[in-house]
Amino acid sequence: APNEMSDHAARACKAALEMQKKIAYLQETFRTCGCPSELYARTGISTGEMVVGNMGSEKRMNYTAMGDTMNLGARIESINKFYKTRILISNATAERVQNDYVLRKIDCVKVKGRSSPEAIFELIRSKEEANAEESFRIESYHKAFELYQNRKWEEAEKNFSELARIGDEPASVMARRCAEYKLNPPPYNWDGAFVMTTK
């Protein structure tokens, strides 16, 4: 902004993926500088209307963005900690970039401050860089997630656990949730969304 860009969502996704590549490249430099562990960054991307521009007063002004879409992006960024992912995007963003990027629907959540459910997707890579092994893992996760949303906790837990055994962190989170729901299922009118209690 203020320049019009019809592909702004795709540009945001490309920037987020390039950031991850750069961070991976810099790991050796970080270690040389004395970092005792790996450094990483999380990104949340949300698409929609917001107020963008210079805001503040004559004494202090900053170029920034404000609004519900911006807040959702911030919440989604934070949710990465919960699922141990690096880049999560909103449903609106996913709809715009699904033909160009490999995505995985991670969950349906209600973020803090919102009552409506929001599907969140992991941004993995461009479709040009997709591989068969990764596609199979994504397909397996989606199958387990469908079982989960249909309240088939036992089958969903089994499928998520199989993925968790090969190091899939979001699947591990979902397998534990299925185990909990087997003992204490959500109410009959559950809409399939998980309520996030923290920002």
Image (spheres, rainbow, N blue to C red):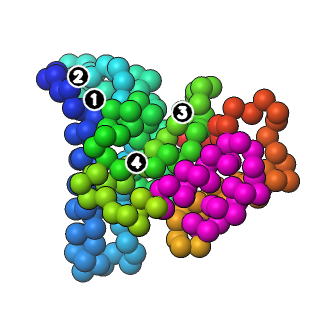
Task: Tell me how far mark 1 sits from mark 4, CA to CA.
Answer: 28 Å
Give the label on residue 64, or none. 1
Residue type at mark 2 is Gly
Q: Nearer the viewer, residue 97 or 84?
A: 97
Residue named by callout 2: 53
Circle 3: residue type? Glu
Asked whether the residues under the numbered discs 1 and 4 touch, taking CB atoms below 8 Å apart as contact, a structural biologist would say no
Judge whether 60 appears above or below 25 on screen.
Answer: above
Q: Which residue is drawn at 27% across and 51% down?
A: 126
- Reading the chain from its start, which is encountered first: label 1 or label 4? 1
Calculate the distance from the C-alpha at mark 3 to the C-alpha at mark 1. 24 Å
Whether residue 36 is visible here, answered yes or no, is yes
Q: Where is residue 70 in the image (x, y as percent from the top left)?
A: 39, 30
The percent position of residue 147, horizontal first and vertical second, equals 67, 49
Q: Which of marks 4 and 2 is nearer the N terminus?
A: 2
CA gap, disc 2 and disc 3:
27 Å
Q: Mark 3 points at which residue?
A: 118
- Secondary element at tag 1: strand
Residue 124: x, y in percent?
36, 54
Magenta stretch: dominant SS? helix
- Mark 1 and mark 2 in contact? Answer it, CB < 8 Å: yes
Magenta segment boundaries in residue numbering: 137-164
Any magenta on residue 162?
yes
Q: Earlier in the sequence, mark 3 or mark 1?
A: 1
Q: Which of marks 2 and 3 is in front?
A: 3
State which quarter of the image contains the C terminus. top right
Q: In which quarter of the image is residue 9?
A: top left
Q: What element carries label 2?
A: strand
Pinpoint residue 92: horizontal percent, then vertical percent.
Answer: 41, 30
Please report whichever mark, 2 or 3, sits nearer to the chain's N-terminal start: 2
Kindly identify the residue that appears in the image at 48 percent across and 62 percent down. 137
